[in-house]
Amino acid sequence: MSDSCCGTTAIEIKQFTTPQQTTPGQTGALPVVVIGAGPVGLAAAAHLAERGIDFLVVEASDRIAASVAQWGHVRVFSPWKYNIDAAARRQLEADGWTAPDGEWLPTGAELIDDYLAPLAKLFRDKVRLGAKVTAISRLGYDRVRTAGRDEVPFLVRLDDGSELQARAIIDASGTYTSPNVLGASGLQAHGEGAVFVDHALPDVLGADRDRYEGKHTLVVGAGHSAATTLLALAELPDTPITWAIRGGSAARTYGGGDADALPARGALGTRLRAHVESGRITLLTGFFTHRVNATAEGVEVVSRDPSGHGQSVTADRIISATGYRPDHSIASELRLDLDPVLGSTRQMAPLIDPNQHSCGTVPPHGVDELAHPEPGYYAVGVKSYGRAPTFLMATGYEQVRSVVAALAGDWQAARDVQLDLPETGVCSSNLAEAQEQRVGLATGVSGGLLSAPLPLATVGATASAESGGGCCG
């Protein structure tokens, strides 16, 4: 109705509430939202449950540990005793669960079936599947607004349009869904998006065998994922294999052989080197992928090095094992302080720099090193490492223990960080033979991975970046 001579209309404003609506300063009543139901995300849930803190785990896939399932055929470098979180173990054993043999090196599938699935079952409806996070912000606040920011809850938006509020965020979403590109300069190679490129660790001896057997396959990358895939391909008859790396030699991938502090890793490099020297695998060094062309003969991959020198190879299949990078886009409205090189926090970067550290030499770190200028937001697990490939599950478990202790207000426990890395924990020579007869040590490859007894590593042994740093389990 008109309430003045000027025709102004009075409008009635209706107030709406939501089940999670809070007022400033009352965020403590809200749950902690954990993003990702993989090993580290579920470990965070275990610590939250043990401290009586309400939580919700949101997982984008329709199953737990979806990324692990993608490499379920691969055996990790570290044994069970390093792959089970302490809080998770306590809760599982209270429910009647029996832990696997602590000295055994599990496959990804065994990690899920024998540990992660039973753990997720304990949390029931506290784990929500098929809930992909598309954005995180502060309720009513964009990244610029400061006054009162710390007193309002986080706002978590899901891909179905629904929203959650949270007192804190533990982002354990990983990096598996954001692999590095094939191009050598960090940019897509010309034409890369127009051809099919498989990413690291396809099941070439199992579900994917028909795609690779008898086909010329090019593997690009110098890490342990590349080595694992190359060894699997070498088991296929009549299957030509080309391996392309940017370096002038493959010494970094071969590692220290018998002297490696992680014998499973050393054996991987020793076997790979034998295949290259025998001619079973053709090695191309100084290969900087620049262009990809689909031709009648297959896919031509063209290298152009920094000096302009070119070389090319034509293959039927391409596997890109060039690593992964973190995707921080969901947190673009939060205040993050990221290292410009690795994409980790600035405090973490010097501790995990792959030019200085292997997975067994990373020093203890916890909530202080993981903290951002946005209080209450923590990226943990492999995502916390940015582009550094030196992550271990045991490291992630200690991260979430520290973070959850801080969220509980137990700062003494949060800062008492202890990191017992499996630098000496995988050296079990009597186990190697038994495991190799079954599936293959540290890979999904059966047969002959180790031909000699494994040496015992000394406490405090280290491996340089040149001797094969990489994700060790």
Image (spheres, rainbow, N blue to C red):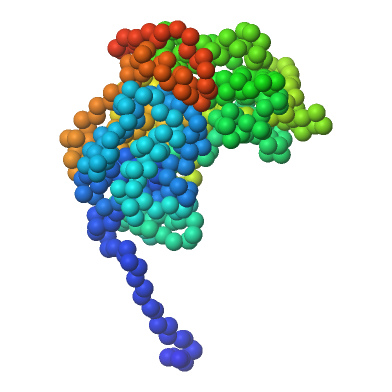
Residue 81, given in percent of the width and then of the height, sits at 31, 27
Quarter the C terminus occupies: top left
Is residue 472 in view? no
Q: Nearer the viewer, residue 348 or 313?
A: 313
Residue 100, given in percent of the width and then of the height, sits at 32, 31
The number of numbered badges drawn on the structure is: 0
Q: Residue at x 55, y 30 (%)?
A: 201
Q: Quadrant of residue 29?
A: bottom left
Q: Residue at x 39, y 25 (%)?
A: 105
* Left or right: 236 in relation to 91: right
Q: Residue at x 31, y 26 (%)?
A: 102
Location of residue 444 with respect to 25 vertically, above or below: above
Q: Nearer the viewer, residue 446 or 319?
A: 446
Q: Residue at x 40, y 44 (%)?
A: 37
* Left or right: 438 in relation to 283: left
Location of residue 422 with respect to 456 vertically, above or below: below
Q: Nearer the viewer, residue 357 or 294?
A: 294
Q: Quadrant of residue 397?
A: top left
Is residue 50 in view? yes
Location of residue 136 with respect to 14 vertically, above or below: above
Residue 427, given in percent of the width and then of the height, sits at 35, 15
* Left or right: 28 in relation to 442: left
Location of residue 76 with respect to 7 vertically, above or below: above
Quarter the N terminus occupies: bottom left
Residue 174, given in percent of the width and then of the height, sits at 44, 38
